[in-house]
Image: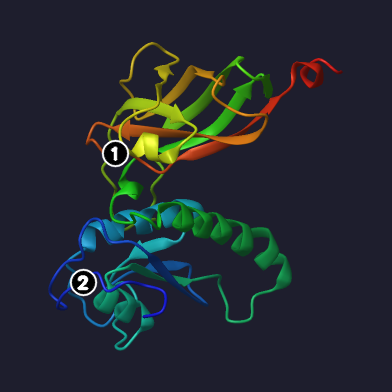
Amino acid sequence: MAQVFLDQKGDMDDPAPDTAQGVFISIHSFGELVLFPWEGTNNDSPNHDGLQTLGRKFGFFTDYSVCQDCLGTASGTTVDAAYGEYGVAAYTFEVGNTFFEGCSGFESTIYPDNLQALIYAAKVADLPYQRPSGPDALNLQLLPSAAAGGQTVTVQATVDDTRFDSNGFGNEPVQNIVSARAAFDLAVLESGGGTTLNAVDGAFDETQEDVTGSIDTSSLAEGRHLLYVVGTDASGQQGPPGAIFVDVVADSELFSD
């Protein structure tokens, strides 16, 4: 672990900072559970709320129960070591319903559901104690799908603050969406810049909002570029970005068909 993660935490009773980076997941079978520290005691960890929030995101994808103390204690786990020593957000996934899962069940449910949780973990690994409480940017679409240099394109997306599920172990607070922005550079979005997107219904006053906006491509060279979209909720938290490719082509290519 020391070759992968920075030491971002003090003593065992000290919380990791909100800016701590990294996600550690230990995958076991079975039980359909998402567990988080502490696993060696029933006491809450100093970062209990942040760990619980990301765990409930995982529960949304897996439909697993998300809990800290629902399976009894287990001392000396790698999850407690990853969190306790390095401050990373650490979890155990108890996947499936049996130690020797059938191929059909694995391929139809366990693999696709857990893959989405793992992809989400990668998206928030830079700020796992912050981003998961913010809204997700989903269902990005681009009109037209390709643009000549300088052409304006329209991006559409859904910004959603509700995608949590603990499956019986409490509800995550959700907030209304207050803004959405788009940019070709993540650093621009992190600094509060980018193109402001509008709520399709005319007002940001719900926990789920469809958004749209016009994007200028005049600064882009020909080729494929990534356009990022982020949303912010009423707590002030910006969620992880969604992204879509924008292909900038010559005029002759755009009208060749």
Given the current orientation, which residue lies at the most extreme bottom position? 76
- Report the residue at 38% width, 69% height from top: 91
Residue 34 percent coordinates (x, y): 41, 66
Task: Give me the C-alpha separation between circle 1 and circle 2.
Answer: 28 Å
Residue 226 in view in this figure:
yes
Q: Position of residue 86 (x, y in %)?
A: 28, 74
Its colouring scheme is: rainbow
**Secondary-structure class at tag 1:** loop
Question: In the image, 48: left or right of 108?
Answer: left
> Which type of secondary structure does the marked residue at label 2 adopt?
loop
The answer to whether residue 63 is seen in the rendering is no
Specify the label residue 9 is tagged with.
Answer: 2
Q: Quadrant of the N terminus?
A: bottom left
Question: Number of marks in the image?
Answer: 2
For discs 1 and 2, the disc positioned in front in the rendered view: 2
Q: Dot 2 surroundings within 10 Å: few (below 14), some, or many (20 or more)?
A: some
Q: Look at mark 1 in the image and give the residue it sits on.
A: 174
Q: Nearer the viewer, residue 80 or 43?
A: 80
User: Looking at the rendering, which quadrant does residue 71 occupy?
Assistant: bottom left
Q: Is residue 62 left or right of residue 240?
A: right
User: Dot 1: within a 10 Å radius of its alpha carbon, few (fewer than 14), some, or many (20 or more) residues?
Assistant: some
Q: Residue 57: horizontal and vertical position, in percent?
A: 40, 52
Give the residue type that dot 1 points to: Val
Three-letter amino acid code of the residue under disc 2: Lys
Q: Residue at x 30, y 79 (%)?
A: 80
Q: Residue at x 22, y 80 (%)?
A: 41
